[in-house]
Structures are given as C-alpha cells and as structure tokens.
Image (cartoon, rainbow, N blue to C red):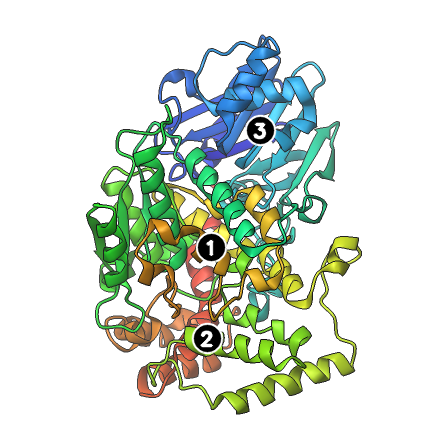
Amino acid sequence: MCGIFGVIGKIDEEQARNCLDTLSHRGPDGYGIWTEKEVFLGHRRLAILDLSERGKQPMSFGNGRYWITLNGEIYNFIEIREELKARGHTFISDSDTEVVLAAYTEWGEKCLHKFNGMWAFAIWDRHKEEMFISRDRFGKKPLFYAYINGNFVFASEMKAITPLLDTVEPNYEILNNNARIFYYESTDACLIKNIKRFPAGHCAIYKNGNLEIKRYWNTLDNLAEVPEKYEDQVEQFRGLFLDACKIRMRSDVPIGTALSGGLDSSAVFSAVAHIGKNVSDERKPANWQNAFSAAFPGTPIDETMFARKVAQNVGVELSSVTIDPQKYVDKLFDYLYLFEDIYITSPIPFIAVYKAMRDNGVVVTLDGHAADELFGGYSFDFLHILHDEMFSFRNSKAVIDTYYDSYINDGVQFKKLPPKFIFWAKEFSRNLVKKAIGYHNHNADENHPEWKRMDYFTQKLYISSHQTVLPTLLRNYDRYSMINGVEIRMPFMDYRIVSFAFSLPWTSKIRNGYTKSVIRDATAAFMPRDIAYRKTKVGFNSPTVDWMRGPLKHFFMETIHDRNFLNSKFIDPKDVSSKITNVINDPRTTFSAAEAAWQSINPYFWEQSFLKRVASPKK
C-alpha cells in the first residue's frame, strides 16, 4: 500500500515531485518517478512484498511498453502468477505489482475479475498512448482525479492535487450539512470543488483528453449460492473466512491486529492464530502475530479486559495503548490535515493505535472492519427486520430482545431503554406508517432484479455497505493507518464474503438472540466462548464525553472563544458553542450528544487544519 500521483499533460517536474511529496506518509520506504513526453507517474512506497529494488515503482513490463503506479495489495497474486507462468509469462520480481502488469497484458480489463485484493492503479500503454485506471470493487483504496488547465491529474489524496489548482474552493454543500457526512464518500463529490473521487468497482481508459469510466463490479451480479441449512451455511462461511485470512497473511514484513475485544477483530485475530499454527504458507512472515488495543481507563467504552483475554487465549501478549488525548491534542490539526475529510468523532485514538504498531515494527494489520455492515451488527440496521416481520409476534420479539441484550446501559451516557412493550409499540407504529405511505428503500441498483428480491433489512445492509456507513469507514481507516505508514487488510471485505453475506437470509444473521450469528458459530472454536457469544456491543470509538469534560475541556473552551472560530463561515458559532458547553456542563449529557457536538465543530477544524494549509500561496 502506497501513495500514487500522476499527470497526463504538461507539468514542471519539480512541481510534480512536490505534489508527490505530500503523500510521503503513505510511502515512507521509497520514492520513484517515471516521465516521458507529457506523462508523469509518481510513487511513494510502503514496502511489504519483495522489499528489494525489484519491487520498486513505477514498474515496467512488456519490454518497457507498460508502466504502472499502484497503491494496494493483490492477495492471491501467487495463484495468478502461476497461471500466468503457464501461459508463458516470466517474472523478475516477487511482487504483486508485476503480476498486475502481466495480468493486464494477458487479459486486459478482465484481469480485474482475477484479483482478490484492494487497489487503485494506473497503467500507461506507451504504444497506444492511453492509460488504464482501476479502483477495487469496494473502494478500500482511495483515488481522486481532476482536470486542470488541460491536464489530467490523479492521486491517492486530495492534498496532492490541490497545489495545481488555481483556486482551492471548499464544497459548502457538504460542509454545511452534517446529515451528508455518511453520504458523500460513495459519490464523486469531494470537500474540494473541481476534484472528483474515482468510483469504486469501476475502471477507465484515458485517451486524447477523454476519460471513459466503466463499471466492472456489481455485488448483485455476483451473489453466491448458499446451502439451505444454517449449519451448512456456517461451514461455508468458515471456509471462506479462513482462506480470506490466510491469503492476507502474505507479507514480507511483520503483521498484527488492532484488537478491540469485540467479536469481529477477535474472530480475525483468532483465525490468524489458528492458520499460523496449522497451515503452511511460504509468504507468512516470521513475526506473524501481534495484538494492539486502545485503552480508555475509567470510561464506559474501555474493552481492554476483553482484548487481553483474546490475546492470552492464543499465547500472545497484548500491547495496550492507553490513549491520553493531551499527548495528541497539539497534533490534532496536523492529523486532520492528513485525514483531509470530516467525520463524527475524533481521529486521535485510531491514529494512536496504528502509530503504536508502526513504532513497534508492525507494518501490516489484519482487522475486523465491515462485519457489522455486512452481517447486521448495528442495532439501527437489524431493527429494520421489523418492517417485514411486524405482524409476527415471535420474530418481532426475537429482534427486540436482541436489541435490548446488545445495548450498553450505564444509565448516564447511554440512557436506559423504555419497557419493551412501549419500544415495540413505537417501532410497530413507525413501520405501519411506512407501509401505509408506500415507503421503499432507494439505491442506485434499485432496478436490479436481485435488489427487488431482497427483504427490507437486507436492502438496508446493502445501502449501509455500498453507499453510506462502510464506504466512509473504509476511507477513515485508510487514513488512520496510512498517516503512520501502516497497511490494513480486511478479511471480511473479501469479495467472496461480501457476495456470501448478501445471499443469506436475515435469519442467518440475527438468530437465537445474537447478532452476526453465522460469524459467531463459524469462529467460536478459535476463541474464548464468552467473547464469541458476548452480546453487548461497544465498538472502537472515542470517549468524547469524558474527554470534553476532562483532559480536553480547556482545548474546547479556548477554541469556542477564539476569533477564528467566531468568524468562521463553516459553522454557526453560537449553535456549536451551545453544543460544546452543554456537553461540558450538563452531567446528564449522553454519548450521542457529545458525538453531535464534535460533528458540529468538525467543519471548523477542517477549515483550520486542511483548507488553510492547502490554500496557502503557492511557492
């Protein structure tokens, strides 16, 4: 995983190098450029496979006809390479990048369907004088582009493009609408106007000034055949999951896991331990299992005890990172510049964990992201089952019982729920109104026949996974980790598992009082049973209430009285100040209220940290 930058058109080489250098955090291990006529390809390397100079990029193939700059990893490159060798191709490196080049020369655009991985890359064909561009199926790796003074420019992050813009104009439509925070990542809209996001699951040819974008992946076209019996579904998932973890252990540098203590990261960590001790893979590194966890002592979201239990179960010492926000608050604007987007919570604990990994020599981490979105781990998703099952007392009761069992109830930050009958009556009425007015889910794929076959709940998961929550989280974790030069691999995002997830009935996901049942039953043998079947869900987050009232109180109070804050066009200073002071002063403040307060001030932080830095006069 790296940082890429490229230009087709006229650009001063020194200026291009400066743009590439804004991505140095993504690739601290190497630097490379290739330029010819009016083509510039740049690469910042995070060395993971074939650490030698043979793995350096930009890389050429086909007697110098093709040149590539790639960000990402192709996990099944060994199998593809063997297939290509059988077809007469030879290789001089041991990297997946060379396999991508050979696959493109052999199969053209169809090579994308061979790849199991995450990527954003551009291949320049010197003979045809055209560029092939692609982004992975689900957008795990970022890619931006722009047309600037007749040039076509692309990069891994916006900050590499902004130095070339005549003016850096913010997108107020997003910044002034908090409701859009989870909705713009799956579109081409960015926080900087005149920069576009290349769509996930698409490829393109750029030639003679024209960019022709084509969709090559649609999950609904690739649904899996699943057995009818639940027990057989569990076996099928277990096989897919173990293989997804196995191929993601291929690395020439140490690997680890960001272990929260919840089901998802524990399943990944425990599966890696099982594979490492029982399966031989020539690309598994010598240092193949490390565990890092964020600790928030004295807060309701601290899960260190659970993470430690999982680590001890496989005989690994947990590296617990106590997150003291005062250590990082002076770097907050630097972090937000590198993050370059907006979100609902502070990036500090996430960045701190991946920094601890890098400081301890761990460069690759296998994490548990995406299981909630795919398999119904969030209550706001699985409550939608009631839309179709509202007249089934048995199923409605099972869903509501599951919701209550998974809810954190500390009586303060997380308020006590009402009696179940009152809650059910409210949900029943809400869904009855939806049915009465003919409400239905909207999605870009809503005319697809498979979409129309999905139940209401599965449609909601599809939207969450392809349009709202998951695309946003994939972006976030790319930034959190790459700020520190660490690569995150996500077994649950294996395209085979995504296809499997949307082929399951809801009863395989929410079952016997548990969320994500098929995951629990498939992985329970690898981890402590009380972790596998733990019902309460916390999730990796920031203890915003505790921080705003405690160690960061002075920072926030100072901020809301600052002249820049009071004059900002990105927020309503009076409204934001009210939200902040309420969190600080009201002893009954909830976690959601603190989250809303952070969300309301975030556009101002973005203005100060990112916009003012990239909009400074050009040197």
**Residue for badge 1:** 519
Which amino acid, by three-letter code, is at mark 1?
Answer: Ile
Which amino acid, by three-letter code, is at mark 2?
Answer: Ala
* Residue neighbourhood size for the residue with mark 2, other residues' Cα within 10 Å, grouped as few (<14), some (14–19), many (≥20): some
Which amino acid, by three-letter code, is at mark 3?
Answer: Ile
Q: Quadrant of residue 63?
A: top right
User: Could you say whether the residue bearing mark 3 is in a helix, strand or loop?
Assistant: loop
Q: Residue at x 64, y 85 (%)?
A: 428
Q: Position of residue 579 (x, y in %)?
A: 42, 81
Specify the label residue 11 is tagged with: 3
**Residue for badge 2:** 596
Q: Position of residue 100 (x, y in %)?
A: 56, 24
- The answer to the question of whether label 3 and label 2 lie on touching residues, with beta carbons closer than 8 A, is no
Kindly report the distance in space between the C-alpha atoms of the residues bearing marks 1 and 3: 51 Å
Question: Image height check: is 49 above or below 472?
Answer: above
Q: Residue at x 41, y 65 (%)?
A: 345
Q: Quadrant of residue 455?
A: bottom right
Kindly report the distance in space between the C-alpha atoms of the residues bearing marks 1 and 2: 32 Å
